[in-house]
Image (spheres, helix red, strand yellow):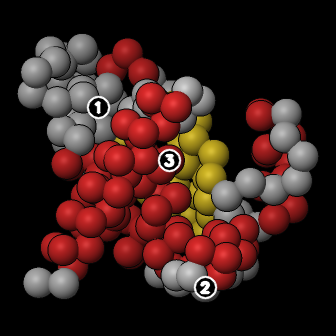
Amino acid sequence: MSIEIANESGVDVDTDAVLAVARHALDEMGVNPLAELSVLLVDIDYMTELNHRWMGGDGPTDVLAFPMDEGSVDHGPGENAAAGGEPALLGDIVLCPEVAAKQAATAGHSAADELHLLTVHGVLHLLGYDHAEPEEEREMFGLQARLLASWRSTRSR
């Protein structure tokens, strides 16, 4: 699995942990090991610009996911490899550590924990999950919680 990460946020972030949680989520979801993912950490100004341009939102957001090649994502062993073994370009996840830190303080956990949650959230969006409807939200957030819990249990061994 090829995962590239670039921290352009100006905030010190444990990028190895962000990479590890992304890799764990993709592995657990049965994504083709040839898949490619990009993770970009940005500052508030750039995230505000991206949120406005692509989502029509005002102000910064915590995470944006830009899927690239939905037709070639191998969602698991029950699905035929649509790309015939070719690398699947999953897309880009954009994170804003400053927004994550504010949300973490409100939620009562660390900024690192919030970034890990947002990374998994972004991966799930790239895999086609959404939370616009209550049923979709229950499924996505339940899966997100299970993936985070399983990742944390592997780290504590």
> What residue is drawn where x is 21% and y is 64%?
150
- How far across and how far down the image is residue 58, in percent? 90, 46
Pick the quarter of the image with the C terminus: bottom left
Q: Is residue 44 left or right of residue 9?
A: right
Name the residue carrying label 2.
Answer: 12
Amino acid residing under circle 2: Asp
Observer-nearest of 110 and 80: 110
Q: Secondary structure at mark 2?
A: loop
Vertical comparison of 15 with 122: above or below: below
Marks 1 and 2, the one that precedes in the sequence: 2
Q: CA distance from mark 3 to mark 1?
A: 19 Å
Q: Quadrant of residue 129?
A: top left
Q: CA distance from mark 2 to mark 3?
A: 20 Å
Marks 3 and 1, the one that precedes in the sequence: 1
Label 1 Cα crowd, 10 Å radius (few <14 / some 14-19 / many 20+): some
Q: Work out whether residue 115 can be spotted.
A: yes
Q: Quadrant of residue 90?
A: top left
Q: Count the marks: how many?
A: 3
Amino acid residing under circle 3: Gly
- How far across and how far down the image is residue 156, in percent? 19, 84
- How far across and how far down the image is residue 103, in percent? 66, 71
Which label belongs to residue 122? 3
Mark 2 vs mark 3, foreground winner is: 3
Amino acid residing under circle 1: Pro
> What residue is drawn where x is 59% and y is 74%?
107
